[in-house]
Amino acid sequence: MCNHHLDEATIVSFASGSISRPLAVVVSSHLEMCSHCRDQVEKAEIIGGSLLEDTEEQPLSDRALNDLLEKLGARNKNHVLEVPEKSLPVQCEVLPNCVSNIVKKPVSEVTWKRVGAGVSLYQIDIEKTDRASYEKLFLMKIEAGRTMPEHGHGGSETTLILSGSYSDELGTFERGDVADLDENIEHQPVVSKEDPCICLVAIEAPTRFKGFFPKLLQPYVGL
Amino acid sequence: MLNMVLAMNADAGPDEKSMTQIALSDLVVRIAEHSDKRAFTELFAYFGPRLKGFMMGRGMNAEAAEDLAQETMIRVWNKAAMYSSAKGQVSTWIFTIARNLHIDTIRREKIVSFTDLADFDQTDEDPVSDEHLIATEETRLVAHAITKLPGEQKEIIEMAFMKDMTQTEIASKIGLPLGTVKSRMRLAYQKLSKSLEDL
């Protein structure tokens, strides 16, 4: 299955719930395709359970219990709450479920913006929170056979491959693989000759690309 | 009836500092199978004040925190049948419910992204009792491992889980590069993860 996984620090942040929305969407998308990282997140969630037990208790108001008991609905023990279909069926659509829920159309109907050098972008709007102010989420399509400029990362950049593939210093990345790169890594992806490569990218700016890459992206994603 | 339940709970005294995970798990099973309000009351006595503390740690005022603690417990009531002791422990399960609820609350728009991971995997219908026992040890082992972490790693783990701080926020709060925060998180995770291997 997947050969490139999430950074353990990302696993911890995701499990804690304290993570930016763009990055959370990329992580959730990868988890849809990667049982290894799902296991990792489940382990990290035990930290939360353990800390919850040790949380300093805050006294509840006198009426809390009565209020609560009155709010309880009837339970039908045979009625398991509707479970959204998350067990992954055959992937006929390129976009992961959690991205489809936001974009609300198949990737074939996405309106790409060509930014040059074989790169097209589609910025995904997610709700603005204070936390998201420096972070962006977008789909990126790179033409087959293209070599991207070598670049480093001012913040973190997390890229999930959705179709096609590319290779760089870290290996070959195919659908489901995630490049969870921190600021110290520089890389130069080369897209395979057969197909364009479509990725889901969360960037925590500022990104200090070397060369012309930032000039391409800046106006479009506001980095 | 309700008064009786309350009285019985009062007789039982304040909740013990830590109930065993097996006892907690049994309460959830009683809720799932019998809609047992007495079991629910006990579970609330244990987790209610902790959940309120958890929400306040994440920056909510006392009133909002209590509301979310109640809302978390309503979800526990409604979803009890989905809890599987073989998959994890009650406190971890309730943590994920509280976490997701907090995230939903601070967001204006609700988009599914934090998922119940349990939904992905088909759970075994009849959990093997060994697995059950193993699962009930998890939080105890991790809790112990957390106390053994170097202070600088423990601090970061607590900021993420209990203070709702991102890596970037942690880095700026303690004045260290993002890379240092990440590496401390990784080290802490590896140690905590290793503590589970002893099972």
Image (spheres, grey):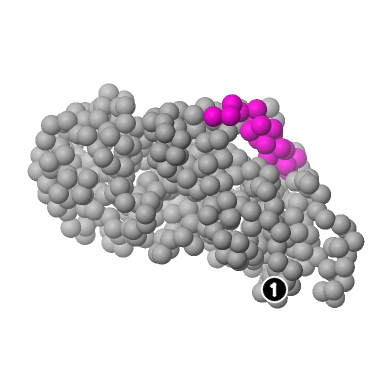
Q: Main secondary structure of the magenta part?
A: helix
Residue A57 falls inside the magenta stretch: no
Residue located at (17% from left, 44% from top): A217
Could you say where residue A33 lies in the image, as x and y percent from the top left? 42, 44
Q: Residue A164: in sight, yes or no?
A: no
Could you say where residue A124 lies in the image, as x and y percent from the top left? 27, 55
Looking at the rendered structure, the secondary structure element under dot 1 is helix
Front position in the image: A97 or B189? B189
Q: Which residue is at the far right?
A: B11
Front position in the image: B42 or B80? B42
User: Is residue B10 toward the left or the right of residue A133 in the image?
Assistant: right
Residue located at (19% from left, 34% from top): A209
Q: How many marks?
A: 1
Per the image, the residue denoted by label 1 is A67
Q: Crowding near pointer 1: few (<14 within 10 Å), some, many (20+)?
A: few
Q: Amino acid at mark 1?
A: Asp
Quarter of the C terminus of chain A within the rendering? top left
Residue located at (54% from left, 58% from top): B60
Quarter of the N terminus of chain A within the rendering? top left
Q: Which residues are magenta?
A: B132-152
